[in-house]
Image (tube, rainbow, N blue to C red):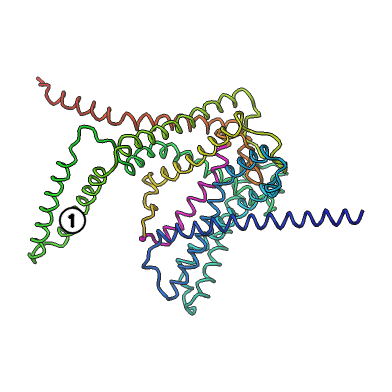
Amino acid sequence: MEEDDVTIREQNFHSQVREYIVCFLLFAVLYIVSYCVISRYKRKSDDQEDEDAIVNRISMYLCTFTLAVSGGAVLLLPFSIISNEILLSLPKNYYIQWLNGSLIHGLWNLVSLFSNLCLFVLMPFAYFFLESEGFAGSKKGIKARVLETFVMLFLLGLLILGIVWVASALIDNDAASMESLYDLWEFYLPYLYSCISLMGGLLLLMCTPVGLSRMFTVMGQLLVKPTILEDLDEQIYCIQLQEEALERRLNGTMSNSYFHANSQHHLYKELDNVHNRRNKLERRKKASVWEKNLLYPIVMLILLAGTAISVLLVALNIVYLLVDETALPKGSTERDIGNASLSTFGVAQAVIEIILMFYLMVSSVVGFYSLRIFQELTPRKDDTTMTTIIGCCVSILVLSSALPVMSRTLGITRFDLLGDFGRFNWLGNFYIVLSYNLLFAVVTTLCLVRKFTSAVREELLKALGNVFCMTPFY
């Protein structure tokens, strides 16, 4: 009997160590990728060997950690779905014994914990640490800046706790809710993260439809469009003439000392635009036939199909919500995985769901940076300040943390939310979930209609304007 107990304890110990190793390896890969991404956009002039350089380096490490956690949040549902299908296909395979329900639940809990840590501690610390200079009268240095940062974090924490306390007291004023107001770990943090998740869901609702329509424009800029009734040689020749004329004007202004510096800057900017236009035309000319006539239509059809399938799944989910109350998103506490497939068509549907989740995430990021409110946060290669990088990391963390909840709420997947992601209060509200689905379907449809009919509407307005201009009025 004692030997059996020892054997069970050894198995539990080895399985726990194995889970820690797998989680560490996955996070290490995400951290390396995140570090490469931030290094690509970080401003190179910030790399100086002084006190500010140390502060920038620490803030960069915190931003890298946050971006890695965001990547983990994006991969949660795809990794869980594909793990479930693998365990169903190969239930007794020795080489996938490490893939189990305990590992999946552990990943969900770790991502939830690190998301809270980054959102409420690390990112505010990075921002305040970057902006701090030390209290007046104190000795300047890293210690003074750290002290000021911790004081600012303490005051910010008191402010947030006070706001949450007042809001929860106004919403729920019964005896049980009043008693829970004094429970910091079991009430405040889950309630606060639930509010942040709702805000992230609303941000996704605002960004994703815009991004879905914007994706066609972005891919059109990246790919080579088909050449129909266009003479590229003539266009390149005309642009070369414009370029030579601008260079002559610029040489004339440099020799003339009375010419204003702003005019020279304007000419340089115009010359750069002409260079970019010529490079685009030369790229279109050098592109192969299949790239011009085959790749572009195929990519556009794939984007259109992905958008149409997403809207169709949301419409079906609305019907399910109206017919069956069990279609509401819910959390799961069961640690078993691989018992049953949650996809009607098996692996094929699971792959489509995963592709749609990545497509929605990319579209939400594109839509986020397309909105005028957030255009200033758009990162630029080798020219992005640390403050902007912090803002980008926080925004991407909010979007990625809300992605599993949005995917389940919209019916993109039937995989139940695990860990703290399934404990959000608003997920059980029928009217909120139904309104979310209706708004997503309606707004996405309107954005696509506006996108594909914009050219027609412009031509009609132009034609009507010409008609009214030519009509005599007596």
Image position of 384 with respect to 452: above or below: below
Along the horizontal axis of the image, is 92 left or right of 192?
right
Under circle 1, the secondary element is: helix
Residue at the bottom extreme of this rendering:
139
Whole-percent x and y of residue 124?
A: 52, 60
Could you say which is closer to the camera, residue 404 or residue 12? 12
Whole-percent x and y of residue 288?
A: 29, 41
**Residue under the image location 59 percent in, 34 percent down:** 347
For the C terminus, give its image quadrant: top left
SS assignment for the magenta stretch, majority: helix
Whole-percent x and y of residue 68?
A: 53, 55
Q: Is residue 386 magenta?
A: yes
**Residue under the image location 20 percent in, 35 percent down:** 230
Q: Which residue is mark 1?
A: 266
Whole-percent x and y of residue 401?
A: 55, 47
10 Å crowding of disc 1: few (<14), some (14-19), many (20+): few
Along the horizontal axis of the image, is 112 left or right of 363?
right
**Residue under the image location 65 percent in, 40 percent down:** 84
**Residue 470 location, quadrant:** top left
Q: Is residue 306 magenta?
A: no
Looking at the rendered structure, the kind of residue marked 1 is His
Image position of 173 with respect to 346: above or below: below
Q: How many numbered discs? A: 1
Residue at the right extreme of this rendering:
1
Image position of 410 with respect to 237: above or below: above
Which residues are the magenta region? Answer: 382-407
Residue at the top extreme of this rendering:
474
